[in-house]
C-alpha cells in the first residue's frame, strides 16, 4: 500500500472554519471592505491573453522590491505568506533539526515544520503574551535551524521590539529567523533590510490583510540575496498566478486607499479597546488589526450572539493560554460602529457586564 512519509501521516488535519461565513467577517483578520477600486478596475480588464500565458513573476518582483526599497534579488513573491513559510521549511530543515516557535501563534508554522520531520520546540509567551526573549535564547541549540516569530503576533496582537528580534538573530547565527510581518501596516515596525547586518534574517509580508487581497494569494519573502537565491530554487517559477501579478502594481500604486483604510482600523482598534476597558472585559492591547479578549465560560455564547446579529468573530480557546478567548478583527469605521453596537448588546444579554457598567 502506498504510504506517505511518517512526518506527514502524523500531521493533524487543519480545517480553518471557513464554512458558512456570511455576514460581517471579523473572524479571519481580512480587510472588511476589500481591495482598492483601482485593483478592481484592473481585474475587470483582464482578458484571455493574460490568462493563456504562464505568469511572469520577475517584472512584478522588481516593482514590489522598489516599493519596499530592497533589491529584486532580495525578494521573492510567494503564494501568500503560507508559501513563504513552506519554502523556508523546505530549504533549511532536515528531519533532525529543531524549529522554535513562540506560542500561542499562527498554526501554519508548526504544520509546515512538522511536515519536514523536524522537531518543533514551542516556547510559551510570558505573562500577558509578552515576548519571551530569554526563554528563546535558552532553547536555542546547535540543532536549531529555524525560528519563526509573527510580529505582531496572531492571535494575541502582541509585538516584540526590534532590538529583541535582532538579539534572537544574533543568538542563532546558524538558524534562519523568519519575522512574519503579516500585520506590518497596523504596527509600523520592521526588520526589513536588517539582513545586511545579519544574513540569517528573513521578513515576510502579505497582501491578504491590509490590502484586501486574501483570495488572490500573494505574499512576499525577503532576505539576504545569497539565502534568497537558494530559497528561490525550491519555488515553482509559476507560484503566483497571472491575475495576482497583474493586480499587484495597482495595489501598490494606490497608497492613499491603503492609508485611509489602515487609519480607520487603528481608530477602530482604539475605540474597541476603550470600550472593553469601560465594560470591564479583559483584553490584550493589540498592535494588529484585531483584538483578543477573554470572556471565560461565556465565550461560545458570545460568539453565537454575535453571529445571530450577523457578525462573525473567532473563538481562540484552543490556542495555548487562550482558554475562553475571542479574537475580533477591526475593519472600516462603519463596521466598527456596527461591531460596537452588537458587542454591547450581546454582552448585556449574556450577563457579562457588572452592575456598575451603564450602557
Ligand atoms: C501571522 C500570520 N502570518 C501569515 C498569515 C497568512 O498569510 P497569507 O494569507 O499571506 O498566507 C496569517 C493569516 O492569518 C497570519 O496571521
Image: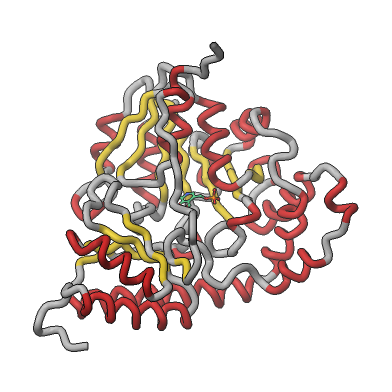
* Quarter occupied by residue 330: bottom left
Q: Is residue 80 left or right of residue 267?
A: right
Q: Position of residue 171 (x, y in %)?
A: 35, 33
Against 324, residue 164 (above or below) is above
| Coloring scheme used | secondary structure
- Above or below, 17 against 254 in this view is above
Image: 219 above or below 339: above
- Furthest residue toward bottom: 358
Q: Residue at x 41, y 81 (%)?
A: 338
- Out of 220 and 140, give the one closest to the viewer: 220
Residue 274 shows in this picture: no
> Which part of the image, by quadrant, shows the C terminus?
bottom left
Point out the residue furthest to the right here.
49
Residue 134: percent from left, percent from top: 24, 39
The residue sitting at 40% across, 77% down in the picture is 268
Front residue of 218/169: it is: 218
Image location of residue 85, percent across then percent down = 52, 38
Q: Nearer the viewer, residue 350 or 31?
A: 350
Q: Indicate the quadrant where residue 82 lies.
A: top right
Q: Quadrant of residue 308?
A: bottom left
Which residue is drawn at the image coordinates 52% and 70% (left, top)? 32
Q: Out of 205 and 81, give the one closest to the viewer.
A: 81
Question: Which residue is at the far top?
Answer: 1
Q: Position of residue 1 (x, y in %)?
A: 54, 11
Amino acid at each position: 500500500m502506498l504510504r506517505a512519509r511518517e512526518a506527514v501521516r502524523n500531521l493533524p488535519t487543519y480545517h480553518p472554519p471557513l464554512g458558512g461565513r456570511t455576514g460581517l467577517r471579523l473572524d479571519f483578520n481580512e480587510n472588511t471592505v476589500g481591495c482598492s477600486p483601482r485593483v478592481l478596475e484592473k481585474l475587470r480588464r483582464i482578458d484571455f491573453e493574460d490568462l493563456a500565458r504562464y505568469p511572469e513573476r520577475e517584472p512584478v518582483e522588481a516593482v514590489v522590491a522598489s516599493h519596499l526599497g530592497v533589491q529584486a534579488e532580495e525578494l521573492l513573491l510567494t503564494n501568500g505568506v503560507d508559501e513563504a513559510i513552506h519554502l523556508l521549511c523546505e530549504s533549511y530543515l532536515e528531519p533532525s533539526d529543531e524549529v522554535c516557535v513562540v506560542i500561542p501563534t499562527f498554526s501554519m508554522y508548526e504544520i509546515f515544520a512538522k511536515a519536514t520531520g523536524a522537531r518543533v520546540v514551542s516556547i510559551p509567551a510570558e505573562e500577558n503574551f509578552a515576548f519571551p526573549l530569554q526563554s528563546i535564547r535558552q532553547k536555542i541549540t546547535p540543532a536549531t535551524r529555524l525560528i519563526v516569530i509573527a510580529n505582531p503576533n496572531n492571535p494575541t496582537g502582541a509585538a516584540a521590539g526590534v532590538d529583541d528580534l535582532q538579539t534572537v538573530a544574533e543568538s542563532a547565527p546558524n538558524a534562519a529567523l523568519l519575522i512574519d510581518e503579516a500585520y506590518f501596516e497596523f504596527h509600523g515596525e520592521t526588520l526589513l533590510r536588517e539582513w545586511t547586518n545579519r544574513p540569517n534574517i528573513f521578513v515576510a509580508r502579505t497582501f491578504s490583510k491590509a490590502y484586501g487581497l486574501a483570495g488572490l494569494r500573494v505574499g512576499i519573502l525577503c532576505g539576504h540575496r545569497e539565502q534568497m537565491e537558494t530559497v528561490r530554487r525550491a519555488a515553482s517559477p509559476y507560484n503566483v498566478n497571472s491575475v495576482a501579478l497583474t493586480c499587484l502594481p495597482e495595489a501598490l500604486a494606490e497608497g492613499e486607499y491603503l492609508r485611509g483604510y489602515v487609519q480607520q482600523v487603528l481608530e477602530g482598534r482604539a475605540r474597541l479597546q476603550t470600550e472593553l476597558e469601560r465594560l470591564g472585559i479583559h483584553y490584550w492591547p493589540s498592535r494588529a488589526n484585531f483584538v483578543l479578549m477573554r470572556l471565560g465560560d461565556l465565550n461560545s455564547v458570545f460568539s453565537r450572539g454575535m453571529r445571530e446579529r450577523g457578525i462573525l468573530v473567532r473563538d481562540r480557546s484552543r490556542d495555548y493560554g487562550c482558554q475562553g478567548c475571542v479574537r475580533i478583527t477591526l475593519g472600516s469605521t462603519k463596521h466598527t460602529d456596527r461591531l460596537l453596537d452588537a458587542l454591547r448588546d450581546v454582552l448585556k444579554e449574556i450577563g457579562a457586564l457588572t452592575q456598575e457598567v451603564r450602557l
